[in-house]
Amino acid sequence: MLEFFDSGSFIPHGHCYLWNPWLVWLHILSDLFIAIAYYSIPIGLLYFIRKRKDLPFQRIFLLFGLFIIFCGTTHVMDIWTLWHPSYWLSGVIKSLTAIISIYTAASFIPLIPQALELPSPSQLVAMNEELAKEIQERKQVEIELTRSRDLREAIYNESTDALFLVDPISLLIFDCNQRAVEMFEANSKSELIGIEVQPLQKQQFTDDEIIARVADMQKFGFWTSEIEYVTRKGKSFWGSIASKPINVAGKNIHLVRVKDINDRKLTEERIHNLNIELEAKVQERTLELSQANAELEIEVNERKLTEERFDLVLKNSPITVFMQDLDLRYTWIYNPALNINPDEIIGKKDFDLFLVPEEAQKISNIKQRVLTSGVGGREEVFVTAEGQKRYFDLTVEPHHDHNGEINGIGCVALDITWRKQSEAELRASYEREIILMKEVHHRVKNNLQIVSGLLYLQARQVQDQKMREILYSSRDRIQSMALLHEKLYQSKNIENIDFIAYIQSLTRNLRKSYASQSMAISLNIDVESINVDMDTAMYCGLIINELVSNCFKYAFPEGQTGQIMIEFAKNGQDSYELIVRDDGVGMAEEIDLKYAKNLGLQLVYSLVTEQLKGEVLLENFHGTVFKISFKIKSIVAI
């Protein structure tokens, strides 16, 4: 075992290099740095695996780490054998490295198909977007269901008739509306829920009658009748009952509506008694008179039913219905909107009712136009009532007599004052928000100007020329951002900025900053007339600041003349291209922007790739050209 550590008769590897110091140190440093790099990689892999507990194939990462450690050890042994010829030990380590390498490769190859099946980032993004869309759609459906349920609840509880939900088997009430509680003089719903419907009737149904009612419902889909009821306090009244089977959540129930017709019944009873009296007094009247009375009774009932339906539709609504004759005098009105007694309106004109003559004239002109043309119209009008403006959506239609001649107009006025007030409040709120945002941008600009001034004063006190240039460059970057906020608070639209004006102001400031270098240099701007959002303008401004500053400093040495060109144009549906070029001396060597040593070029590359999510191309031929392409998230044409 000791022979693995014994140098034996071997000579150190340094003899092969004739102990040339340069050659020896070349191999020492190369192997050393390779070993350091190899050893650092497993540390990163181990940290990565510990942070990502959900990472698949963790075992292969550990094998790669072990393999890399042994690879680094072989390079350490190459340094050791320069002076110590422990070649057996070096060989064993290399053989272990080979074994681990083969085992790692054998373990990795079967995992390739599984790794390819893992979803890509774009697939995960698409899945997340689809899931978010589905969640949004479900939320919208839930909102619509909630609105529908609230609407049904409002209709259910605001009905002028008593509504009951009854079990078709046990005939027990398991729900009712508030009108049912009021109609049957109960203290609460709980007093009615759980009892049968029949105890509320003055006379109970027989079994045969119940069977007949069920047969009618099955045949016609509903059943209706007039029944005398008894309230919970023992008071009798007549009601019109209608029962209909419905299905709620897969359960069959009966919806029972009870309408209070006690007044009508009493009227009918009085009429009936009067008819009996009249028949006793005028038995000699003919059958034709009896038939006429019957027809009159039917007509009275129909008119009452019509009036009840009309009242049900318009009661407690913001709608006013009225009619006027050819002279625009009110002949009939229902539900006056201005808190005026209807009797005070009949026979009057608009000039008699409205406080401001101009308003009355405007409304009269609309109505007169309908009378003249015979064509209905709809307009929004306002009137002054009770010391405030009231807005109405006015619909005017011509009214015709039996001969088809226009004998007046019919109008429907919908009170929309609340909507107009809401619109005014929203408009005022938006204007306040605009003023606040402009004030914020103004203050940000002032603060950035203060920072710029402090950097300028600091630069004047710095003796080191390189440090002074760094401070001046930082000052220019801050000035570009301050200029952007200045343009925003001066702009009418704070969401977008005029890109041409911003670039012109930015380059004008840069020319002043480099006045000594820019005297013989012309600066040309070719930018499409567009508006861009604040973030895009800031990133582009910083990029132009860096590139134009470099042109002034390095592209035209010793007072050489030339020109700098800035171009910005659309090269696709949503894609745009920013080009900064000069015809100066160009760069001395090819530069990979990704690994540029210059801070300004590093900043340009970072802004393009990380912030704008775009690409940058550098051309160094007859000057320098930077071509930057990216997409703008929101552009509005001027």
Image (cartoon, rainbow, N blue to C red):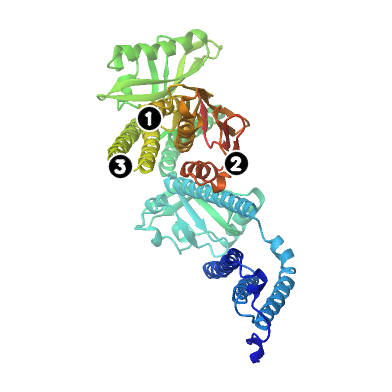
Q: In the rendered structure, which amino acid carries the disc numbered 2? A: Glu
Q: Nearer the viewer, mark 2 or mark 1?
A: 2
Query: Which residue, given by chain and number where applicable, does mark 2 sit on?
Result: 590
Confirm or deny contact between disc 3 and disc 1 (CB under 8 A).
Answer: no
Position above or below: 385 against 480: above
Res 120 → quadrant: bottom right
Residue farthest along the left direction in this orientation: 387
Q: In the rendered structure, which amino acid carries the disc numbered 1? A: Ser
Calculate the distance from the C-alpha at mark 3 to the C-alpha at mark 1: 17 Å
Q: Whole-percent x and y of residue 299?
A: 51, 30
Calculate the distance from the C-alpha at mark 2 to the C-alpha at mark 1: 28 Å
Q: Residue at x 35, y 21 (%)?
A: 382
Disc on the earlier residue, 2 or 1: 1
Calculate the distance from the C-alpha at mark 3 to the C-alpha at mark 2: 33 Å
Q: Whole-percent x and y of residue 210?
A: 58, 59
Disc on the earlier residue, 3 or 1: 3
Q: In the rendered structure, which amino acid carries the disc numbered 3? A: Val
